[in-house]
Image (cartoon, coloured by chain):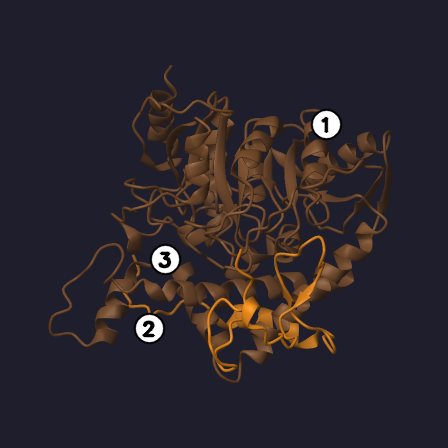
Amino acid sequence: MNDKTCLETDVETDDVLTHFNKIDKADLDNITPTVLPVTADQPLRDDTEEQPLDRKDALHGETEDNYFVGPKPR
Amino acid sequence: MNPHDQAKQINKDHHYFTTLTPDVDSADKGEIDDLTISFKDNIVTEDVETTAGSAILDGHTPTFDATVVTRVKQAGADIIGKTTMDEFGFGSFNLNTPHTPPRHPDDDERVTGGSSGGAAGITATMNDHVAIAESTGGSIVNPAAFCGVPGFCPTYGLVSRHGLISYANSLDKIGTIADTTDNARRVFNTIRGYDERDATTLDEEPDTDEVEHIGILPFNADDDVTTAFNNAVNTLSHDYTVEHVETPFTQEYALPAYYIISMSEASTNLARYTGLRYGPTGDPRGKHFTRYYTEMRNVFTDEAKRRIHLGTYMRMEGYRDKYYTRALKARTKVINEYKQLFNEYDILITPTMPMTAPTRDEARNLSPVETYEMDQLTVGPNLAGLPHGTIPIGDDLPKGLLIITDHLNDGTVLDFMQRHEGRL
């Protein structure tokens, strides 16, 4: 067991972060994140789309501020 | 020999189980009552210790069964235990563990692969056994390929994750490693399906398509693996149209995108392990919470600490857009690249792992980045949530053929695996 605490630990992180910085070079203009799972009738969903304010679709929430945009209840 | 006694015997030398369960005569008879089943140790089981391979959950005994456990029990299977894994799934060789690492079934010095190392090892050693395992970035097909058994990871959302101890929520999937593809399919059919306790499950039936066109994805592998793969392709080319395809974006960005997303989500999931609610508790009297919290979390392996540090950093204000959000966008491009290929090809193939199982010393000498690069061939389908499976190919030390197809075409992968299992 490492005798240093989680905050004091000296695990290697710099090389890993350098590797991750490759993502800076990706051309991601006009790309939006996809929410999984992908369904047959709606192949790719976009979690940045504005959601309709339909109370029947909401799991929780009474106001626009805490509107829940998760999957519909079954 | 009684399978429970057999598992106990095997475990003495091979360390495939964290917990062995007693032989209980099940009153339930069902479609899989001829099989023994094990669960990866991150799938919760009522009154049976569940630690996700971590010392921080030592002694943790859940009060309920995961949905997949309930379904397996109702189908009459005999449950023999909880299998060894890298801590919370953090690893490719099952060496990131506070316990004795599992031994490769053919060579005591070699690793089983990971993170579902115990699951693959016991499946390679026992007949009529199916291990229910979990994959975030390749944790089913990686050890299955190293140990020479079929492994299957379904479309994200087809199997309930209620009761799965989370590693990275947008990537985790439960699947099967089995002595035969037929048994992997039978258990998959038992555990899949909509679950009201998991809002991400799909209420859809997986499809099966006829395979005519196969695309070979680009890969870099050692000579042994490349030879076995080329021989397999030669055999397949008698029955199918086989062509090389390109995935430039996936090749370049799937690996960093996968690790950014998985570490970011892991760092939030692991925040709950404070030494207060789950697992061992210390004596917090007279200590500032931060001191107590960090002392209790000292039991994490170095790899878990690395992922907590990096994941937390990449979610910090000002860095989230640079890392996590960009990685999510990269995932969309990876999915689109696969979708383009599936317009033309029914399945895509590569070797499952770029090498055969290394020795424990060889694996320990790899740097973190070198270790992550071992996942180069498996992170793509996992990042995209695509169904994929592996079957053994070649001779000598086991090697795997990775088969990937479009979302919800799980039957296509399983049919192809079953048709060619033992013939490549």
Nearest the eye: B25 or B110: B25
Q: Please tell me the numbered disc located at residue B301.
A: 3
Chain B: its colour in the image is brown
Residue type for callout 2? Leu
- What is the distance, in whole Å, between disc 3 and disc 2 at their CAs? 13 Å
Badge 2: residue crowd in 10 Å (few <14, some 14–19, many ≥20): some
Residue B61 is at least partly visible in this image: yes
* For residue B331, above or below residue B229: below
Where is mark 1, residue-wise? B419
Residue type for callout 1? Arg
Where is mark 2, residue-wise? A7
Q: Say which quadrant the C terminus of chain B sits in.
A: top right
Kindly identify which chain the residue marked by label 3 belongs to: B
Residue B328: quarter of image: bottom right
Nearest the eye: B119 or A44: A44
* For residue B324, above or below residue B300: below
Kindly identify which chain the residue marked by label 1 belongs to: B
Identity of the residue drawn at 27% across and 41% down? B47
Q: Give the percent coordinates (x, y) of residue B182.
A: 61, 27
Q: Say which quadrant the N terminus of chain B sits in.
A: top left
- What is the distance, in whole Å, between disc 2 and disc 1 at their CAs? 52 Å
The reply to whether callout 3 and callout 1 are in contact (CB within 8 Å) is no
Q: Give the percent coordinates (x, y) of residue B266.
A: 45, 63
- What is the distance, in whole Å, between disc 3 and disc 1 at their CAs? 41 Å
